[in-house]
């Protein structure tokens, strides 16, 4: 299950998505800190819905195995560009 929230500002569309079970948790390792806060707390979506919305996003912030793997599978994220904090994958996308 994936939680997804969309923010719009001017012409930018920021999509924040996380695996639902990670919401409210914090992870830290090697000086990195990942806070899966209410920033991600939106509607519950399927992988298919996440992929559809990623096509509309200009910026994406993704956390968790399921959310990140959808973005990799659909070609939005290069698998070599994922960081892990305490084993939890995190990736970002920006269209320029």
Image (tube, rainbow, N blue to C red):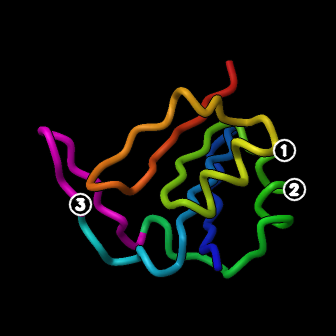
- Cα separation, mark 3 vs mark 2, equals 28 Å
Q: Residues within 10 Å of mark 3 (few under 14, many from 20)?
A: some
- Circle 2/circle 1 CB separation < 8 Å: yes
Quarter location, residue 2: bottom right
Whole-percent x and y of residue 58?
A: 70, 36
Would you name the residue on which mark 3 appears? 27
Label 2 Cα neighbours within 10 Å, binned few <14 / some 14-19 / many ≥20: few
Residue under the point 70% across and 47% down:
71
State the mark number for residue 44. none
Image quarter where the C terminus lies is top right
Closest to the observer: 44 or 5?
44
Tag 1 or tag 3, which sits nearer the N-term? Answer: 3
Question: Label 3, label 1: how many angstroms apart (C-alpha)?
Answer: 28 Å
Residue position marked by numbered label 2 in the rendering:
52
* Residue where numbered disc 1 is placed: 55
As helix, strand or loop, the secondary structure at mark 2 comes to helix
Left or right: where 95 falls relative to 88: right
Mark 2 vs mark 1, CA separation in Å:
5 Å
Task: Say which residue appears at 66% left-offset and 35% top-offset.
Answer: 77
The part of the chain drawn in magenta is 27-38
What is the x, y in percent for residue 9? 62, 45
Q: Residues within 10 Å of mark 1 (few under 14, many from 20)?
A: few
Q: For the residue labelled by badge 3, is the local secondary structure a helix, a strand or a loop?
A: strand
Q: Quadrant of the N terminus?
A: bottom right
- The outermost residue toward the top is 96
Magenta span contains residue 40: no
User: Where is residue 69 drawn, in percent x and y?
Assistant: 66, 52
Q: Nearer the viewer, residue 73 or 91?
A: 73
The percent coordinates of residue 55 (x first, y second) are 84, 44
Task: Give the mark, 3 or 2, whose residue is nearer the N terminus.
Answer: 3
Select label 3 or label 1 by which is in front: 3
């Amino acid at each position: 299950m994936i939680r997804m929230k969309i923010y719009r500002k001017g012409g930018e569309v920021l999509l924040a998505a996380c695996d639902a079970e990670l919401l409210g948790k914090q992870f830290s390792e090697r000086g990195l800190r990942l806070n899966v806060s209410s920033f991600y707390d939106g509607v519950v979506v399927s992988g298919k819905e996440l992929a559809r919305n990623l096509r509309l996003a200009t910026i994406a912030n993704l956390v968790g195995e399921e959310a990140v793997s959808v973005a990799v599978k659909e070609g939005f994220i290069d698998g070599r560009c994922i960081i892990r904090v305490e084993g939890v994958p995190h990736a970002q996308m920006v269209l320029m």
